[in-house]
Image (spheres, rainbow, N blue to C red):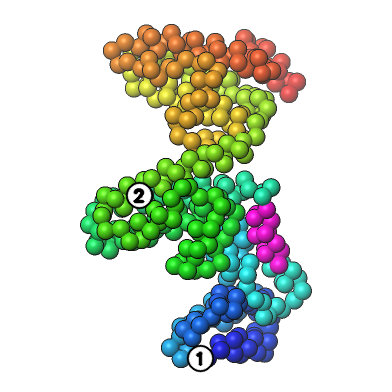
Amino acid sequence: MPNLLKIVDLISEKINKDYFEDIALAAYYGSYATGTFNEKSDIDIFFIPKTERGWKMGDCFIFQDIGIDIFPISWDRVESISDFDESICSVIADCKIFFSSSTPDLAKFKGFQKKIKYYMQIENKAFLLNKAVDKFQKIYKILYRMEKSVVLKDSAFMTYKHEFMIALFEVYAHLNQRYFKSGWGKNLNEIFNFKRLPAEFEKNINILLEGKDVSNVISCCKSLIEDTEEILKVDMEKSFIPKKAEEVFNGYYEEIKSTFNKIIVACDNNDYELAFFTATHLQTEITKLLVLQATSFWNPPVLDYNALDRFYSAQKFPDILSKLNRENLSELQVVVSELEQKFVSFLKNNGITFKSFESFESYQQYLELK
């Protein structure tokens, strides 16, 4: 069995001889870095170019029936990986550096390694929780496509199963403030040992891996989505930090006043389309602002509109959307006026003051003092 670390030595010699000013750093990762390689293991090598010429050091070849990829990574991509934007943090965090052109370059790289460790500390959970939520949104699209590929032997269906599991695994890595040290297919033990997992997670994953019944596989995916959404909701609510009312609502009533007026005009003119769009916008906007005040999140993405409505209902604001009726908009007009009165009282009770003028002269005086 060839020891491919010899290739590392040869590359190091080449860089020192011909590319010293062109490459900032070079390292290897994977099984050779962890000491778990076998006779068919490749060696994973990357480098960070400093100049255009440095990129030319990249290469792909086969050595004694083993594929070798020596690839460049820009500093920008190193930063992106260290921000958990890709599921390959181990490339940066666990690599073995075999070349650096300067102390500042080495220090810069080690700074990105420290950032990965920083995000994995429990007190910094909110950062990776948001990453988990962002990744979770993509799972719905995968499931939709999977449902349209209804034949299990169809390669598209199998591909969507693969994408679904990888996206789900990344969600749970973020939720558990971890990154994968092994590649896909080798990391199931890592995943199953995460502390933050739903019940029967391992069982459901094995159904996806081996399931022969299409409806059963899709049902399993939906169950995993529901379980994951519930965990995300619980963890996100633990991270809610209320904002002061003035941070959220200062100047808002002055801005939204025209929307109240548009609804009244729409009702007077029996213009259902205008009433629909303006009323929906108004209630949704007020709801999201109340959520923002209570949670510091603008429309938390794992909380659907049914869940968000509780923030609106808690203020005893009327549900104006329930009064949308093409045949008769008079009820809508009444509840919109009620909403405006209650919203103004809410703002005043929270110390919000309004800026209004009754004449051009008073506005002119205001401008002169501004």
The residue at 43%/8% (across/down) is 334
For residue 53, above or below residue 281 = below
Say what amino acid the circle numbered 1 marks: Met
Residue 67 in sight from this viewpoint: yes
Q: Which residue is mark 1?
A: 1
- Count of numbered circles in the view: 2
Residue 134: x percent and y percent?
50, 48
Identify which residue is drawn at 66% across, 14% down. 349
Give 143 or 345, whichever is nearer the viewer: 143
Asked if marks 1 and 2 touch (Cβ < 8 Å), the reply is no
> Pointer 2: residues within 10 angstroms few (<14), some, or many (20+)?
some
Q: Residue 124 placed where, x, y %?
A: 67, 49
Which is the main secondary structure of the residues drawn in magenta? helix
| Residue lying at 53% horizontally and 62% vertically, measured from the top left | 190
Whether 104 is drawn above or below 310: the answer is below
Residue for point 44% across, 44% down: 227
Mark 2, residue position: 220
- Residue 75 appearing in the image: no
